[in-house]
């Protein structure tokens, strides 16, 4: 049941839904920000008053920017079904759990709607504005963040080999070694191809790789242990570097987008 706390990843209590009755501190694009909200954000995030105000201003600017984004009821249904499936519960079970937590089904659907609107907004307004990096830019990013591309330097395994691929496949099912040779091997990352490194990184201790053609025979490995530290070669790290670079750029692009909105925004400070 702990998995059900994943529901919390989509905030059940949003700033817009918080029932706070207090003085209005400011109005951003027609949306009020109360002093109680500012204090709540300070307390919940451990930030200063100025930082809390900035967060709330961005929240209201985002709300204004998303006003024309529409999410259909069918889209919400599909999203909720996916969340239920991820948590291995049915929709009725999910409704009961949310009720126990004090969250109405209507409120939950509205929360999902807002989360999906933010996602659409992010894709349409932010991600599409980020140009793809050149290979030189990725290499520079890789060079400056090498600590983030660390992998084991040594793999200790049992190597199984056979002239016949079917014998290896049969061995995987029956564990009968007839016609299959085996030996313990220790391999270093620096002597391996990026393809083999990728395969071994995805293989858990005690698990087997798939059989692959080694030229004069077919081989597969059973992982025993991984140890040491090495830096991924760029050829292997490139797709990971691209994902990390995009993540970094997205954060910057989002900040820049709202900073530009803020310059011309209608913000009235009342107290």
Image: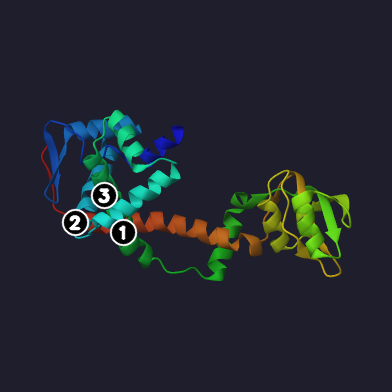
Q: Which residue is mark 1?
A: 120
Q: Secondary structure at mark 1?
A: helix
- Residue that appears at 26% across and 34% down: 103
Q: Secondary structure at mark 3?
A: helix
Residue 259 in view of the camera: no
Q: Is residue 239 left or right of residue 182?
A: left
Indicate the quadrant where residue 161 lies. bottom right
Residue 264 or 75: which is nearer the viewer? 75
Q: Which x, y percent locates residue 213? A: 78, 67
Instruction: State the CA–CA distance, disc 1 to disc 3.
Output: 10 Å
Indicate the quadrant where residue 163 lies. bottom right
Q: Which mark is first along the chain, 3 or 2?
A: 2
Instruction: State the CA–CA distance, disc 2 to disc 3.
Output: 10 Å
Q: Which x, y percent locates residue 204? A: 68, 46
Residue 170 or 203: which is nearer the viewer? 170
**Above/below status of 137 relative to 224:** below
Residue 110 or 123: which is nearer the viewer? 110
Q: Which residue is mark 3?
A: 114
Residue 180 in view of the camera: yes
Q: Residues within 10 Å of mark 3 (few under 14, many from 20)?
A: many
Q: Secondary structure at mark 2?
A: loop
Quarter of the image for the C terminus: give it. top left
Q: Is residue 61 left or right of residue 220?
A: left
Q: Residues within 10 Å of mark 2 (few under 14, many from 20)?
A: few
Q: Which mark is first along the chain, 2 or 1?
A: 2
Quarter of the image for the N terminus: give it. top left
- Residue that appears at 81% across and 66% down: 214
**Above/below status of 271 relative to 126:** above
Q: Which x, y percent locates residue 48? A: 30, 34
Indicate the quadrant where residue 138 lies. bottom right
Instruction: State the CA–CA distance, disc 1 to disc 2.
Output: 12 Å
Task: Please tell me the numbered disc located at residue 67.
Answer: 2
């Amino acid at each position: 049941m702990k998995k059900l706390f994943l529901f919390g990843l989509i905030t059940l209590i949003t700033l817009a839904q918080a029932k706070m009755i207090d003085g209005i501190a400011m109005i951003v694009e027609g949306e009020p920000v109360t002093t109680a909200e500012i204090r709540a954000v300070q307390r919940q995030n451990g930030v200063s008053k100025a930082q809390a105000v900035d967060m709330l201003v961005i929240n209201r600017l985002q709300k204004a920017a998303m006003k024309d984004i529409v999410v259909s009821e069918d889209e919400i249904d599909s999203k909720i079904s996916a969340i239920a499936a991820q948590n291995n519960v049915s929709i009725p079970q999910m409704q009961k759990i949310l009720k126990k937590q004090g969250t109405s089904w209507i409120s939950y659907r509205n929360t999902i709607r807002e989360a999906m609107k933010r996602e659409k907004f992010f894709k349409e307004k932010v991600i599409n504005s980020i140009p793809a990096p050149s290979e030189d830019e990725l290499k520079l990013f890789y060079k400056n963040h090498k600590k983030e591309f660390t992998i084991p330097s040594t793999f200790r395994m049992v190597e199984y080999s056979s002239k016949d691929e079917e014998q290896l496949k049969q061995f995987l099912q029956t564990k009968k070694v007839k016609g299959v040779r085996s030996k313990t091997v220790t391999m270093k990352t620096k002597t391996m191809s990026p393809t083999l490194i990728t395969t071994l990184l995805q293989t858990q201790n005690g698990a087997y790789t798939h059989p692959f053609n080694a030229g004069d025979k077919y081989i597969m490995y059973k992982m025993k242990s991984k140890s040491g530290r090495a830096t991924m070669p760029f050829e292997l790290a490139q797709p990971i570097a691209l994902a990390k670079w995009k993540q970094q750029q997205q954060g910057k692009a989002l900040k820049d987008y709202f900073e530009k909105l803020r310059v011309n925004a209608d913000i009235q400070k009342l107290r």
